[in-house]
Image (cartoon, rainbow, N blue to C red):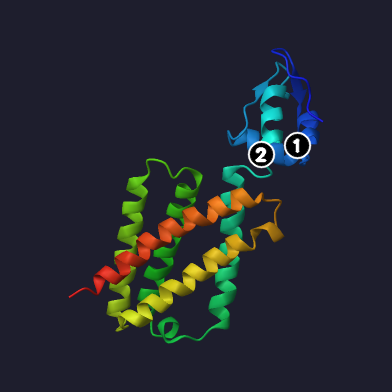
Amino acid sequence: MAVEATPKTWLSLAQAAQQLDIHPTTLRRWADNGDVPVIRTPGGHRRFAAADINQLAERGESCSPTELSQQWAEQALSHTRREISAHDEAWLVTHSHDLRQRHRQLGRELMALTLQYIADPAHNDHLLEQARQVGQAYGQIAQESGLCLTDALKAALFFRDTLLEAAFNLPEYAHVQPEDNRRLMQRINHVLNTVHLAIAACYDP
């Protein structure tokens, strides 16, 4: 039930969390990340405007953008490691130690770029340009490994599938609204499209 909001209505952490039907620790994290407006009393206690909490409750938000992206990243990394261990594809075993290290570094860069883009895709053309550069580097590694374009794209699609599957399955691990999850998958897909087109471009004559 929504609290009647007046200019002077403030809720404690416990009251606001109860209204949103989330754990107080989750709301504390949202506030500390800047995802929910909060003030501090002289005694250091958090206070939330009832109007802000009512708005969040009406939107049915169960996960802040920051927390959603972090939860996806944790699941994506775990899922990718399991999938790599379970497969014995040619493109996985032909890499030298040096190329594997470069591949891991690019993977970390791509994950960081994707997390930034998930958080705020507006006016982030520079992030997509960086994603394109990561794709070029992936393409160069594939060529150095002697992979044909088909195998290079198989590798790219393997990682694409694991990242998107982690997002698709996220509601099993977290209380995520369908609209939030759909938006998450669209943003991940946008970044990966940029990467894959850049890989293919490396093989153009």
60 lies above or below 146: above
In the current view of this chain or complex, which residue is farthest to the top?
8
Tell me the quarter of the picture where residue 100 sits: bottom left
11 lies above or below 194: above
Q: Is residue 109 visible from the viewing direction of this image?
A: no
| Residue located at (53% from left, 83% from top) | 87
Q: Secondary structure at mark 2?
A: helix
- The residue nearer to you, when weighing 60 against 28, is 60
- From the image, tell me which residue sits under label 2: 29
Tell me the quarter of the picture where residue 18 sits: top right
| Residue located at (80% from left, 29% from top) | 15
Sequence-wise, the earlier of marks 2 and 1 is 1
Tell me the quarter of the picture where residue 106 sits: bottom left
| Residue located at (32% from left, 77% from top) | 142
Q: Say which amino acid is labelled 1.
A: Leu
Q: Say which amino acid is labelled 2.
A: Arg
**Labelled disc at residue 20:** 1
- Residues marked 2 and 1 touching at CB (< 8 Å): no
| Residue located at (53% from left, 65% from top) | 163
165 lies above or below 147: above
103 lies above or below 124: below
Count of numbered labels shown in the rendering: 2
State how far apart marks 2 and 1 are (Cα).
14 Å
- The residue nearer to you, when weighing 160 against 81, is 160
